[in-house]
Every structure is written in C-alpha cells, then in structure tokens.
Image (tube, rainbow, N blue to C red):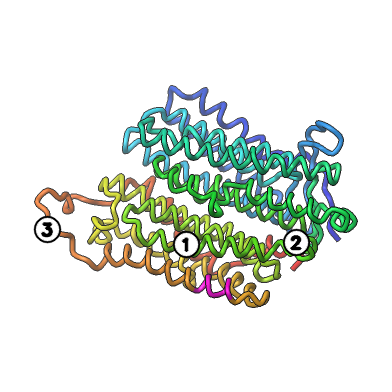
Amino acid sequence: MTGIIESARVLLPVAITLVAPLFIWLYRGDQNKREGVSFVAAGLTFLSVLSLAPQVLAGNIWKYTLFTILPGITVTFCADGLSLIFAIVASFLWMLATSYNVGYMRSLDEHAQTRYYVCFAVAIFGAEGVALSANVFTLYLFYEVITVFTYPLVAHHQDEEGFSGARKYIVYLMGTSKLFLLPAMVMTYVLLGTLDFHLGDAMKGMFPPDVVEAHPLAVTITYALYIMGIGKAALMPFHNWLPSAMVAPTPVSALLHAVAVVKAGVFCVCRIILSGFGVEVMDKLGLGIPTAMVAAFTLTVASFIALTKDDLKARLAYSTVAQLSYVVCGVALLTPMAVQGGMAHIAHHAFSKITLFFAAGAIYVATHLKKISLMDGLGRKMPWTFGAFAIASLSMIGMPPVCGFVSKWYIVNGALQAGQMGIFLAFMLSTVLNAGYFLPVIYRAFFKEPAPDPHSHYEHYKEAPLTMVIPLCMTGAISVILGLYPALFMDFVRIFGKF
C-alpha cells in the first residue's frame, strides 16, 4: 500500500538549486569561488535527492504543497520512483559537468563565464523542479524555466550562427509549449477541475472512467496536445531545434542532450502517459500504439540522417533524437517490459550520451577538430577520451555489458509482448544504423593512420585537461556499472510501476 509523506523535505533539491545561481553571481569576481559554489551546490543537491530514496524504495511518496493558486491549481512537489530517476541523474551529472566546465571554459578562455555558470545552474533548478512536480501546472512552470535559461547558453558565442541556432531553439520550444502544452493544461482543468497527477499507480491516471466515457474525443485531443506540446522530447516533426542548438559550447550540448533539456522532455512524456492518463485509459482509447509508431519513425529516420553527418556533434545530435524515441516508444507500448525499459533508458542514455559529448568537447579542446574524417589515429594520442567514447558508443548501439543493452533489451521484448512486429523491426534496423554511425568513428581513431599533412599538428596532440578527462572516464565507467548492476535504477522503475 502506497503511503503519502507530507513533508517540506521534498523541496530541498529545488531550494538548493534556486539559491546556487545567486551565490555564483555574488562571487562573479572570483572564478575559483564561483566554480566552488557550483561544486558544493551540485553535491548538496545530489545528497538531498538521495536522502529521499529510502522511503520511495519502501513504497512511499513524498509530497508537499507550496502554494494554492486556485482550487485545483497548486504548486506542489512530489518524489516517487519516476521522479528520482530524473532527479538523481540531473544532480549527479551536474557535479561531473561542473568539473568539465572548468576545464573547457578555462582552456578556451571563454567570455561571459559568470552568465554561463548562472544559466547552467538555473537549468538544473528547472530540471529538479520538473522531476519533482506533482501536477501539470508545476511541471509547466519549471519546463519553461529550462527553456528560458538555456537560451543564453545556446547563444553563448553571440555570433550569427549562435543567434540563429538560439532563435530556432526558442521558437520551437516556446512555440510548442504555448500552442499545444498550455491548451492541453487548460482542457485538463476544464474536464477534471484539477491538474494533479495520479501518483502511486501507473495503471490509473488523472482521468476517471466516467470522464473518459463521457468525453472520449476531448480526452484524446488533450493527449495529442500534450505530446505535441512537449517539444523537448524531439519527436518528429518537432525535432529540428536540437541539431540547431549544437552551435552552443560542448558542455551546453551535454546539458541539452543528457541532463536537463531533452531528459525533461522524455520525462514529461513518461509522466503524462503514466501519471496523467494511465495505462488503462491509454489502452482503452488506443493512444499508445500510434504514439509508439511516431517514435519508431523518428528513431529510424534520425538514425539514417546521423549516418550522413561528418561533424561529430551533429552526428551525436541526431543520435539523441533517435535515442529519445526509445524512451517514448517503450512507455507508449504500455507492456510491462517496454515501460520498464523506456523509463530506465532515461538514466542509461544520460550517462552514455554525456560521455560522448564530453569526449567531443575534449577532442575539440585538445585538437580543435570537429570533423570525423579528420580524426584518423587520434585514439593513439587520446586513448582515455576515445576509450570512453567507445564504451558509450557500445551503449548507444545496445551491446552488453554496457547499460544501453539492458534498457533496449526490455524495450525490444516489450514490443514483442505487444505483438508489434513493425516496431520491433524498426528497433532492429536502428541498432544496425547505430553501429553504422558509431563504429567508424572508433575505427578511424584507433586503426587508421593519420593522413600525411605538413600543416598537421598530430605529433603534438595529447589528452585534454584532467578536469575534462576524469569526468568523461567516470561517466563511461558508470555506463558499464549500470549495465552490470541495472538494479541501481531498475528498482525505482519497478517501485513506480508496481511491476
């Protein structure tokens, strides 16, 4: 029996991440103190999230209402199994990203570093808020916080390319949220008189049977608006902001792709499907399989596009579009194995993808190279960086013993449970394509001789600073640990879904 623990303790991660940007700004004149605040805040946030885990694993849910705006509209926070998957990932990776930021920003002597660190911290504040939201209203507020404060990060270089990518970023994400997500929230309130998620049971959502039977079309339209409104999930055709945002510094790309932005997107999809509508309503109205088909289409097409990209970050960007759709597809299939795999992939993809982007940034800092075709032999000069890249690539492909294998195994078997052979074949094709665009990078780095070029600096190349290499090696190692000990996140998945 699920118990509700009414306690302000659930606010701690949000409170810490709210205060941290203020102290970062106060210490703007001392870069050591400014960066030290980021380290301390990240560590405290992680510990505060982790302190909620024992009760959640015991089957309880933390909950606390901060404000009541109108009847049925409140700012309320909760912590259940799904919350902690995202909250733990965001806070833990913030610690490693801070170390990486120090190496990257100092090595390249980037401008506006205080603004950068402040916006980075506020983005984590938004991520923690999304993770711990107990209703649609609270989720919407923090969803928009992430969008607004990651815009300056995307436009960080303040050149024509940066502003162009940032404009597309803000138009896509603000446009989808205002045109679709906000109306979906309004329709939910009109139908139910409340915006509170149904917590503690993934089978039953917010919509009671009598409302579904009386207004099936309205409920279906509301669901479609939610899915279209969560542009951060990067389902086609609302995906193009993500490759365009690659003009940002590499640590920002890592934040976008592995920590805050896209993970907030797929987390919101999971929350809406499982705590908003619930498996029973999704199945009754036939909403799951069409959603899974859109996701399967996205992951297939994005994988084909990734094959054509020679720019490493662009290839990783389209890989992210594809991998996010594994999460959406798994949850939308509604079978126990697929739902478990989709939820677990939120965490598994995060550790592997941030490794890939950390590696891309380390390569750029050490060599100033972006094109894959110019990386022949670099693995011999940067073995730690490319070794971690290789491990994370195997996770993206779905090879054991790396964590991507575990979540994809669940999702693929879930597709068979649902009898969806077409989606199963899309998964198989995507796996082949994943190998097609990751393995050549590894082959070039370790097995090809560098092209003779009198202007090449190949002999002088070496690993990036340790503040960058250590975090990417750690995230690569954690990807293996999660593959060998998947219960670290699967326990939260199972307690949430009562699997």
Label 2, on which residue? 282
Q: Eyeballing the image, is 252 above or below 89?
A: above
Q: Residue at x 38, y 30 (%)?
A: 158
Overall secondary structure of the magenta stretch? helix
What amino acid is at disc 1? Val
Label 3 packing within 10 angstroms: few (<14), some (14-19), many (20+): few
Q: Which residues are magenta?
A: 422-428
Cα distance between the residues tagged 2 and 3: 59 Å
Mark 2 or mark 3: which comes first in sequence?
Answer: 2
Viewport quadrant of the C terminus? bottom right
**Label 1 with label 2: CB-CB less than 8 Å:** no
Residue 424 placement: quadrant = bottom right
Residue 96, given in percent of the width and then of the height, sits at 48, 47
Label 1, on which residue? 301
Label 3, on which residue? 452
Residue 437, given in percent of the width and then of the height, sits at 37, 64
Element type where label 1 sits in the image: helix
Return the residue found at the far front.
217
Q: For marks 2 and 3, give the one nearer the viewer.
A: 2
Q: Per the image, is 329 magenta?
A: no
Q: Which mark is residue 326?
A: none
Q: Eyeballing the image, is 74 above or below 311?
A: above
Element type where label 2 sits in the image: helix
Is 236 displayed left or right of 185 in the figure? Answer: left
Is 454 displayed left or right of 368 in the figure? Answer: left
What amino acid is at disc 3? Pro
